[in-house]
Image: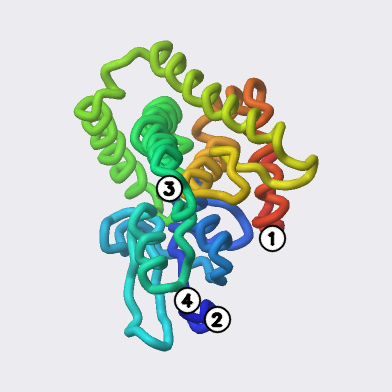
Protein backbone atom coordinates (compact mmCIF):
# COMPACT_ATOMS: atom_id res chain seq x y z
CA UNK A 1 0.00 0.00 0.00
CA UNK A 2 1.00 3.61 -0.48
CA UNK A 3 2.43 5.13 2.68
CA UNK A 4 -0.59 6.85 4.24
CA UNK A 5 1.72 9.38 5.88
CA UNK A 6 2.45 10.76 2.43
CA UNK A 7 -1.22 11.44 1.79
CA UNK A 8 -2.79 14.76 2.68
CA UNK A 9 -6.57 14.82 2.77
CA UNK A 10 -9.01 17.64 3.33
CA UNK A 11 -12.60 16.52 3.88
CA UNK A 12 -14.98 19.31 2.98
CA UNK A 13 -18.03 19.07 5.23
CA UNK A 14 -19.81 22.36 4.65
CA UNK A 15 -19.24 23.59 8.21
CA UNK A 16 -16.39 25.10 10.23
CA UNK A 17 -16.61 22.90 13.33
CA UNK A 18 -13.72 20.41 13.17
CA UNK A 19 -14.33 18.89 16.61
CA UNK A 20 -17.99 18.14 15.98
CA UNK A 21 -20.03 15.83 13.79
CA UNK A 22 -22.10 17.41 11.04
CA UNK A 23 -25.70 16.45 10.27
CA UNK A 24 -24.99 14.72 6.96
CA UNK A 25 -24.77 10.92 7.40
CA UNK A 26 -22.51 10.71 4.37
CA UNK A 27 -19.88 12.99 5.89
CA UNK A 28 -19.60 10.88 9.04
CA UNK A 29 -19.59 7.75 6.87
CA UNK A 30 -16.49 8.98 5.04
CA UNK A 31 -14.79 10.25 8.19
CA UNK A 32 -15.27 6.83 9.77
CA UNK A 33 -13.96 5.13 6.63
CA UNK A 34 -10.82 7.27 6.71
CA UNK A 35 -10.24 6.51 10.38
CA UNK A 36 -10.65 2.79 9.76
CA UNK A 37 -7.97 3.12 7.07
CA UNK A 38 -5.67 4.97 9.46
CA UNK A 39 -5.70 8.05 7.24
CA UNK A 40 -5.26 11.44 8.89
CA UNK A 41 -7.29 14.32 7.49
CA UNK A 42 -8.27 17.88 8.16
CA UNK A 43 -11.79 19.23 8.02
CA UNK A 44 -12.51 21.69 5.23
CA UNK A 45 -15.28 24.26 5.29
CA UNK A 46 -16.36 24.27 1.65
CA UNK A 47 -19.94 23.23 0.94
CA UNK A 48 -21.81 21.30 -1.75
CA UNK A 49 -21.69 24.07 -4.34
CA UNK A 50 -17.89 23.96 -4.41
CA UNK A 51 -17.68 20.20 -4.95
CA UNK A 52 -17.63 18.42 -8.32
CA UNK A 53 -20.96 16.66 -7.77
CA UNK A 54 -22.73 19.43 -5.88
CA UNK A 55 -22.88 17.61 -2.55
CA UNK A 56 -20.86 16.85 0.56
CA UNK A 57 -18.54 15.29 1.43
CA UNK A 58 -15.84 15.86 -1.12
CA UNK A 59 -12.12 15.43 -0.60
CA UNK A 60 -8.97 17.18 -1.74
CA UNK A 61 -6.25 14.52 -1.95
CA UNK A 62 -2.53 15.09 -2.38
CA UNK A 63 0.13 12.36 -2.45
CA UNK A 64 3.81 12.25 -3.34
CA UNK A 65 3.07 9.94 -6.28
CA UNK A 66 0.14 11.78 -7.86
CA UNK A 67 -1.01 15.26 -8.76
CA UNK A 68 -3.55 16.80 -6.33
CA UNK A 69 -7.08 15.71 -7.15
CA UNK A 70 -10.64 15.95 -5.91
CA UNK A 71 -12.71 12.92 -4.88
CA UNK A 72 -16.46 13.06 -4.47
CA UNK A 73 -19.40 10.82 -3.49
CA UNK A 74 -19.35 8.64 -0.39
CA UNK A 75 -19.68 5.48 -2.52
CA UNK A 76 -16.86 6.36 -4.91
CA UNK A 77 -14.37 7.84 -2.44
CA UNK A 78 -13.54 4.52 -0.67
CA UNK A 79 -13.14 2.77 -4.02
CA UNK A 80 -10.71 5.45 -5.17
CA UNK A 81 -8.68 5.18 -1.96
CA UNK A 82 -8.51 1.39 -2.32
CA UNK A 83 -7.41 1.67 -5.95
CA UNK A 84 -4.66 4.12 -4.97
CA UNK A 85 -3.42 1.79 -2.24
CA UNK A 86 -4.36 4.16 0.56
CA UNK A 87 -7.00 1.90 2.13
CA UNK A 88 -7.74 -1.80 2.41
CA UNK A 89 -10.92 -3.28 0.94
CA UNK A 90 -13.02 -3.90 4.05
CA UNK A 91 -15.31 -6.30 2.18
CA UNK A 92 -12.62 -8.42 0.53
CA UNK A 93 -12.78 -11.18 3.21
CA UNK A 94 -16.58 -11.53 2.95
CA UNK A 95 -18.39 -14.37 1.24
CA UNK A 96 -20.63 -13.60 -1.73
CA UNK A 97 -23.68 -13.86 0.53
CA UNK A 98 -22.18 -11.54 3.13
CA UNK A 99 -21.30 -9.02 0.43
CA UNK A 100 -24.93 -9.11 -0.68
CA UNK A 101 -26.09 -8.43 2.86
CA UNK A 102 -23.61 -5.56 3.14
CA UNK A 103 -24.89 -3.96 -0.06
CA UNK A 104 -28.51 -4.42 1.03
CA UNK A 105 -27.94 -2.68 4.37
CA UNK A 106 -26.27 0.27 2.70
CA UNK A 107 -29.03 0.54 0.12
CA UNK A 108 -31.74 0.38 2.79
CA UNK A 109 -30.30 3.37 4.60
CA UNK A 110 -28.85 5.41 1.75
CA UNK A 111 -31.66 4.90 -0.77
CA UNK A 112 -34.70 4.63 1.50
CA UNK A 113 -34.17 5.95 5.03
CA UNK A 114 -32.32 8.92 3.59
CA UNK A 115 -35.47 10.17 1.86
CA UNK A 116 -37.50 9.71 5.05
CA UNK A 117 -34.92 11.93 6.73
CA UNK A 118 -35.17 14.51 3.95
CA UNK A 119 -38.92 14.64 4.44
CA UNK A 120 -38.74 14.97 8.23
CA UNK A 121 -36.00 17.59 8.14
CA UNK A 122 -36.71 19.66 5.05
CA UNK A 123 -40.51 19.49 5.11
CA UNK A 124 -41.51 18.77 8.70
CA UNK A 125 -38.86 20.96 10.33
CA UNK A 126 -37.98 23.29 7.50
CA UNK A 127 -36.87 26.40 9.42
CA UNK A 128 -34.44 24.46 11.61
CA UNK A 129 -32.95 22.69 8.62
CA UNK A 130 -32.74 25.84 6.53
CA UNK A 131 -30.95 27.81 9.22
CA UNK A 132 -28.45 24.99 9.77
CA UNK A 133 -27.59 24.24 6.15
CA UNK A 134 -27.71 27.87 5.02
CA UNK A 135 -26.09 29.49 8.04
CA UNK A 136 -23.51 31.18 5.81
CA UNK A 137 -26.21 32.93 3.78
CA UNK A 138 -27.34 36.22 5.35
CA UNK A 139 -30.95 37.26 5.73
CA UNK A 140 -33.07 38.00 3.75
CA UNK A 141 -31.29 36.05 0.99
CA UNK A 142 -31.54 32.94 3.16
CA UNK A 143 -35.34 33.14 3.08
CA UNK A 144 -35.40 33.12 -0.70
CA UNK A 145 -32.81 30.34 -0.94
CA UNK A 146 -34.71 28.34 1.65
CA UNK A 147 -37.99 28.61 -0.22
CA UNK A 148 -36.29 27.45 -3.38
CA UNK A 149 -34.81 24.45 -1.56
CA UNK A 150 -38.16 23.66 0.04
CA UNK A 151 -39.95 23.56 -3.31
CA UNK A 152 -37.15 21.51 -4.84
CA UNK A 153 -37.38 18.94 -2.05
CA UNK A 154 -41.16 18.75 -2.32
CA UNK A 155 -40.80 17.92 -6.01
CA UNK A 156 -37.90 15.51 -5.44
CA UNK A 157 -39.78 13.57 -2.77
CA UNK A 158 -42.91 13.39 -4.92
CA UNK A 159 -40.96 12.09 -7.91
CA UNK A 160 -39.02 9.61 -5.76
CA UNK A 161 -42.18 8.38 -4.04
CA UNK A 162 -41.65 9.29 -0.38
CA UNK A 163 -43.74 12.43 -0.81
CA UNK A 164 -46.79 10.37 -1.74
CA UNK A 165 -47.14 8.75 1.70
CA UNK A 166 -48.73 10.08 4.88
CA UNK A 167 -46.61 10.92 7.92
CA UNK A 168 -47.96 7.85 9.73
CA UNK A 169 -47.11 5.57 6.83
CA UNK A 170 -43.59 6.96 6.70
CA UNK A 171 -43.10 6.49 10.43
CA UNK A 172 -44.21 2.84 10.30
CA UNK A 173 -41.61 2.15 7.63
CA UNK A 174 -38.94 4.19 9.43
CA UNK A 175 -39.61 2.25 12.63
CA UNK A 176 -39.33 -1.06 10.77
CA UNK A 177 -35.94 -0.07 9.38
CA UNK A 178 -34.49 0.95 12.73
CA UNK A 179 -35.93 -2.10 14.48
CA UNK A 180 -34.28 -4.29 11.86
CA UNK A 181 -30.90 -2.61 12.31
CA UNK A 182 -31.27 -2.83 16.08
CA UNK A 183 -32.04 -6.56 15.88
CA UNK A 184 -28.93 -7.22 13.80
CA UNK A 185 -26.76 -5.23 16.18
CA UNK A 186 -28.30 -6.94 19.19
CA UNK A 187 -27.22 -10.32 17.80
CA UNK A 188 -23.72 -8.98 17.09
CA UNK A 189 -23.45 -7.49 20.57
CA UNK A 190 -24.06 -10.90 22.15
CA UNK A 191 -20.90 -12.22 20.50
CA UNK A 192 -18.70 -9.26 21.49
CA UNK A 193 -16.73 -8.57 24.64
CA UNK A 194 -18.32 -6.11 27.02
CA UNK A 195 -16.23 -3.14 25.89
CA UNK A 196 -15.24 -3.97 22.31
CA UNK A 197 -16.85 -2.64 19.15
CA UNK A 198 -19.19 -5.02 17.40
CA UNK A 199 -20.24 -4.91 13.76
CA UNK A 200 -23.51 -5.04 11.88
CA UNK A 201 -22.77 -8.29 10.02
CA UNK A 202 -21.50 -9.99 13.17
CA UNK A 203 -18.00 -10.21 11.69
CA UNK A 204 -14.73 -9.78 13.56
CA UNK A 205 -13.94 -6.59 11.66
CA UNK A 206 -16.00 -3.71 10.26
CA UNK A 207 -17.31 -3.75 6.71
CA UNK A 208 -18.45 -0.96 4.41
CA UNK A 209 -21.97 -1.32 5.82
CA UNK A 210 -20.72 -0.24 9.24
CA UNK A 211 -19.57 3.10 7.88
CA UNK A 212 -23.06 3.75 6.53
CA UNK A 213 -24.84 2.51 9.64
CA UNK A 214 -22.69 4.63 11.94
CA UNK A 215 -23.12 7.68 9.73
CA UNK A 216 -26.90 7.40 9.82
CA UNK A 217 -27.01 6.76 13.56
CA UNK A 218 -24.90 9.81 14.35
CA UNK A 219 -26.91 11.95 11.95
CA UNK A 220 -30.13 10.84 13.63
CA UNK A 221 -28.82 11.55 17.12
CA UNK A 222 -27.46 15.04 16.44
CA UNK A 223 -29.75 16.60 13.81
CA UNK A 224 -32.12 19.00 15.55
CA UNK A 225 -34.37 18.88 12.49
CA UNK A 226 -35.20 15.19 13.03
CA UNK A 227 -36.81 14.94 16.49
CA UNK A 228 -39.09 11.98 15.70
CA UNK A 229 -36.24 9.86 14.40
CA UNK A 230 -34.02 10.78 17.34
CA UNK A 231 -36.71 9.84 19.85
CA UNK A 232 -37.32 6.54 18.08
CA UNK A 233 -33.67 5.52 18.11
CA UNK A 234 -33.00 6.70 21.66
CA UNK A 235 -36.04 5.04 23.21
CA UNK A 236 -36.50 1.87 21.17
CA UNK A 237 -33.08 0.89 19.81
CA UNK A 238 -30.68 0.22 22.71
CA UNK A 239 -28.29 -1.91 20.65
CA UNK A 240 -28.01 0.89 18.11
CA UNK A 241 -27.04 3.34 20.86
CA UNK A 242 -24.50 0.93 22.36
CA UNK A 243 -22.98 0.23 18.95
CA UNK A 244 -22.56 3.93 18.20
CA UNK A 245 -21.24 4.72 21.67
CA UNK A 246 -18.48 2.12 21.44
CA UNK A 247 -17.45 3.29 17.98
CA UNK A 248 -17.40 6.92 19.10
CA UNK A 249 -15.23 6.18 22.12
CA UNK A 250 -12.75 4.16 20.07
CA UNK A 251 -12.58 6.11 16.83
CA UNK A 252 -13.99 9.60 17.52
CA UNK A 253 -12.85 10.43 21.04
CA UNK A 254 -11.69 13.82 19.74
CA UNK A 255 -15.28 14.74 18.79
CA UNK A 256 -18.10 16.01 20.94
CA UNK A 257 -20.58 13.23 21.65
CA UNK A 258 -24.32 13.49 21.11
CA UNK A 259 -26.52 14.21 24.12
Q: Residue at x 43, y 27 (%)?
A: 120
The answer to whether residue 136 is left or right of residue 36 is left
* Residues at discs 3 and 1 in contact (Cβ within 8 Å): no
Q: Residue at x 23, y 25 (%)?
A: 158
Viewer-side residue, 32 vs 180 = 180
- Label 1 and label 4: CA atoms lie apart by 27 Å
Residue 111 appears at what percent x and percent y?
Answer: 34, 35
User: Circle 2 — which element?
Assistant: helix
The answer to whether residue 220 is left or right of residue 109 is right
Q: Which mark is residue 1?
A: 4
- Label 2 and label 1: CA atoms lie apart by 20 Å
Residue 198 appears at what percent x and percent y?
Answer: 65, 42
Say whether disc 1 or disc 4 marks the residue closer to the N-terminus.
Answer: 4
Callout 4 environment at 10 Å: few (<14), some (14 to 19), or many (20+)? few
**Residue 24 visible (yes or no):** no
Q: Residue at x 45, y 59 (%)?
A: 89
Q: Which mark is residue 254?
A: 1
Q: Quadrant of the C terminus?
A: top right
| Mark in front: 2 vs 3 | 2
> For the view shown, which residue lies furthest in the bottom direction?
64
| Mark in front: 1 vs 4 | 4
User: Circle 1 — which element?
Assistant: loop
Q: Quadrant of residue 168?
A: top left
Callout 1 environment at 10 Å: few (<14), some (14 to 19), or many (20+)? few
The answer to whether residue 48 is left or right of residue 230 is left
The residue to which callout 2 is attached is 5
The residue to which callout 3 is attached is 133
> For the view shown, which residue lies furthest in the front direction?
95
Say whether disc 2 or disc 3 marks the residue closer to the N-terminus.
Answer: 2
Q: Which mark is residue 177?
A: none
Q: Relative to 243, say whether 48 is above or below.
A: below
- Label 3 and label 4: CA atoms lie apart by 37 Å
Amino acid sequence: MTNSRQAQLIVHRGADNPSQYVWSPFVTKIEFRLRLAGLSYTCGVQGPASGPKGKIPWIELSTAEHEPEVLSDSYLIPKALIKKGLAHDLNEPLSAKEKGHDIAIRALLEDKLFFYNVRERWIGNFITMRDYTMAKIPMPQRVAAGEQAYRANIQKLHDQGTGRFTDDEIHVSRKEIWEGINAMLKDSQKMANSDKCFWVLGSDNPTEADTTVYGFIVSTLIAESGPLSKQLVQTECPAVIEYATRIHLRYFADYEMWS
